[in-house]
Image (spheres, rainbow, N blue to C red):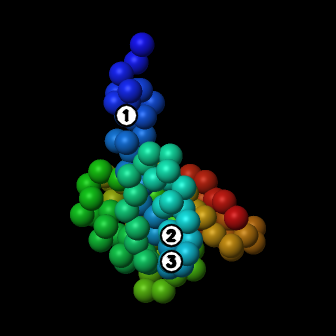
Amino acid sequence: MQNAGARNPAEEVKMSKHILIVDDSKTIRNLVSFILKKEGYRVTMAEDGLDGLEKLYAANDIDLVISDINMPNMDGFTFIRTVREQEVYRNLPIVVLSTEGQEKDIKQGISLGANLYMV
């Protein structure tokens, strides 16, 4: 019989995972954050690529980045390129979540280092 207050190992893993959401749309940030938090993940949100870099550097424990492409100040392509240029983040999973679904955009995102591109 399991203690009602105890977490199972799968829940412990989720609680330890930290996801950075980089999107200029407050609605998208809040929606994705809500879904991830409901599943037990820790979430940090950033308003654009520059804010995303600041939060990535400050957190030092990000396990996954979900990024938009079209953003002010620093777009998602520049954000991905900047992250991948740093050795410490070469293996950090990056998922693009964007309405930009043209083949050229998808190819560019993947070639810059995104692990997955979702339209």
Marks 2,3: beta carbons within 8 A: yes
Residue type (three-letter) at the residue carrying disc 1: Glu
Question: Residue 28 is drawn in which quadrant?
Answer: bottom right
Q: Position of residue 45 (x, y in %)?
A: 40, 67
Say what amino acid the circle numbered 2 marks: Arg
- Residue pictured at 36% horizontal, 76% vertical: 51
Q: Earlier in the sequence, mark 1 or mark 3?
A: 1
Q: Which residue is mark 3?
A: 26
Dot 2: element: helix
Query: What residue sits 42% from the left and 13% below the top?
Result: 1
Work out whether residue 78 or residue 71 is closer to the camera in this orientation and state it: 71
Determine the image quadrant of residue 118: bottom right
Q: Which residue lies under the disc numbered 1?
A: 12
Q: Residue furthest top?
A: 1
Residue to which mark 2 is pinned = 29
Which of 56/105 is in front?
56
Instruction: Measure the alpha-carbon separation of dots 2 and 3.
Output: 5 Å
